[in-house]
Amino acid sequence: MATISEYLGVRTNNVAEYVGVVRALALALELGATEVDLLLDSKLIVEQVNGRWRVKDLKIVPLHAEVRASLARFRRWTANHVPRAQNSAADALANEAIDRVRAGGPPVVVRRPDPA
């Protein structure tokens, strides 16, 4: 499994969630994935990515476009909503980034699977 823990500074929750999706999709493509299942605790973003809801926030428009362009590069993809209580791994990575930066560490840590 690969993970990204990145300190984003002060952002809205929706912008931070979209940035997380952009980074995750880029890493999945880098690792050669052809399929991706997004599990997001933001129903808004799930509905926007799936094309059921419009994107009205101008800060989100370019991020949404980038996500959709990245998703087009996969053979298959899904985006589903999960309750925040079931998405503790994402919260742990966000808290890890905040704590790491406060301690003087790097803003981004990417963990890739060990090559077999």
Image (cartoon, rainbow, N blue to C red):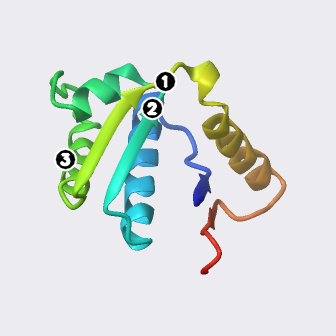
Badge 1: few (under 14), some or many (20 or more) residues near its Cα, within 10 Å? some
Q: Quadrant of the N terminus?
A: bottom right
Q: Counting other residues with Cα less than 10 Å from the Cα at mark 3, is it few (<14), some (14-19), or many (20 or more)?
A: some
Give the CA distance from mark 3 to mark 1.
Answer: 22 Å
> Quarter holding the C terminus?
bottom right
Query: Horizontal and vertical percent for residue 101?
Result: 74, 54
Quick check: 8 left or right of 51?
right
Q: Is residue 25 above or below residue 114?
A: above
- State which tag comes first along the sequence, 3 or 1: 3
Instruction: Give the labeled residue for mark 2.
Output: 40
Q: In terms of image quadrants, where is residue 59? A: top left
Q: Which mark is residue 65?
A: 3
Helix, strand or loop at disc 1?
loop
Q: Tag 2 or tag 1, which sits nearer the N-term?
A: 2
* Residue 28 percent coordinates (x, y): 42, 62
Q: Is residue 29 above or below residue 49?
A: below
Q: Residue at x 25, y 57 (%)?
A: 70
- Disc on the earlier residue, 2 or 3: 2
Q: Which mark is residue 82?
A: 1
Instruction: Depth check: give the residue in front, 113 or 67.
Output: 113
Kind of residue at disc 3: Ala
Residue at figure coordinates x 58%, y 45% from the top left: 9
Whole-percent x, y for residue 40 in the image: 45, 32
Relative depth, front residue between 115 and 38: 115
Q: CA distance from mark 1 to mark 2?
A: 6 Å
Given this view, does label 2 or label 3 mark the residue nearer the observer?
2
Q: Secondary structure at mark 3?
A: helix
Please name the amino acid that badge 1 sits on.
Answer: Val
Mark 1 and mark 2 residues within 8 Å of each other at the beta carbon? yes
